[in-house]
Amino acid sequence: MIEFINVGKTYPNNVKALQDINLKIEKGEFVAIIGLSGAGKSTLIRCINRMHDISEGELIVDGVKVNALKGREIRNYRQRVGMIFQSFNLVTRISVLKNVLVSFVPHLPFWRKVIGAFSKEQKIKALTALDQVGILDKAYVRVDQLSGGQQQRVALARTLAQNPDIILADEPIASLDPVTARQVMDDFKRINRDTEMTFIINIHHVEMALEYADRIIGVREGRVVYDGEAKNVTEEVLDYIYKGNVEELERNTEERSYV
Ligand SMILES: Nc1ncnc2c1ncn2[C@@H]1O[C@H](COP(=O)(O)OP(=O)(O)OP(=O)(O)O)[C@@H](O)[C@H]1O
């Protein structure tokens, strides 16, 4: 379980990106984080894998106080929390398989990773992950010869090969066409169902978020302003998350589960 207790995050330039965040996300949930640009969505998910340090409160993942981790503990922790980016973060001039294999040795310098000898077991794990996302046939193809959707699948396979408990995805479909974006979301959903890995996706496409996620967390100006099931998200809720229509909220507070 991921637990935010009164979490705040202030950047060195004094921007308060997160304030009073209180959340519990259970194992196996499929959560979408939505909100305006600059609302704090990326900051929220990046605190979970310690890409950012929180400034206040407590962040606890499976009983571990994330901010108390140091050095090697952080590296070990990050192996359990996979991260997928809009830009895929792949090395395009090497093969798909090599890109997945490097997930086993994240702490080595890049040149060591590329020339590194990997065990048969590691290769099998990597090939299994490629099979899970339907691109096993591309294992020996250079990444720069793949489409954007296929590259996002390589990124997902690389994360899966780590066998993480949690997958964080920061705008994973932002640079994909609608058909490919849907295929990537289908992959996420299927893997979430099959493996019980927790998925937390920061996403601008509201319709996709509502269609695929079970739970929606709406963020506005660094605060969680909606937290509930995707099926309960109405136009008014979206209006509140995106436009801050306070009067609307006050009229509806009795019957709705706004935070
Ligand atoms: N490294 C940083 N240093 C200083 N301020 C930052 C940093 N990263 C983000 N911010 C600020 O923190 C706030 C939240 O940013 P964040 O990137 O989390 O928002 P977001 O909802 O993910 O936006 P987008 O959808 O545009 O990616 C913004 O005001 C942003 O300018």
Image (cartoon, rainbow, N blue to C red):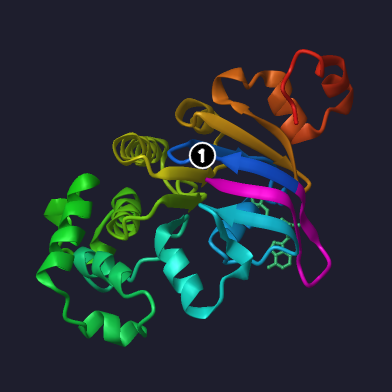
Q: Considering depth in this image, is 208 or 9 the residue closer to the camera?
A: 9
Q: Residue at x 47, y 55 (%)?
A: 86
- At x 45%, y 72%, the residue is 75
**Is residue 144 at all visible to an observer of this figure?**
yes
Is residue 226 shown above or below 40?
above
Locate residue 239, reporting x and y percent.
74, 26
Q: In which quarter of the image is residue 204?
A: top right
Element assignment for label 1? loop
Q: What stretch is highlighted in magenta?
A: 1-20
SS majority, magenta: strand
In this orientation, which residue lies closer to the viewer: 46 or 164?
A: 164
Q: Is residue 14 magenta?
A: yes
> x and y percent of residue 166 in the render?
44, 50
Residue 49: percent from left, percent from top: 53, 61
Residue ID for mark 1: 26
User: Does 114 sit left or right of 22 as displayed?
Assistant: left
Quadrant of res 116: bottom left
Question: In this rendering, does residue 42 appear at all?
Answer: no
Q: Where 82 sits versus 174, above or below?
A: below
Name the quarter showing ligand 1: bottom right
Q: Which residue is drawn at 82% across and 19% down?
A: 253
Q: How crowded is mark 1: few (under 14 residues within 10 Å), some or many (20 or more)?
A: some
Q: Split into 4 quadrants, where in the image is the C terminus?
A: top right
Q: Nearer the viewer, residue 176 or 106?
A: 106
Residue type for callout 1: Glu
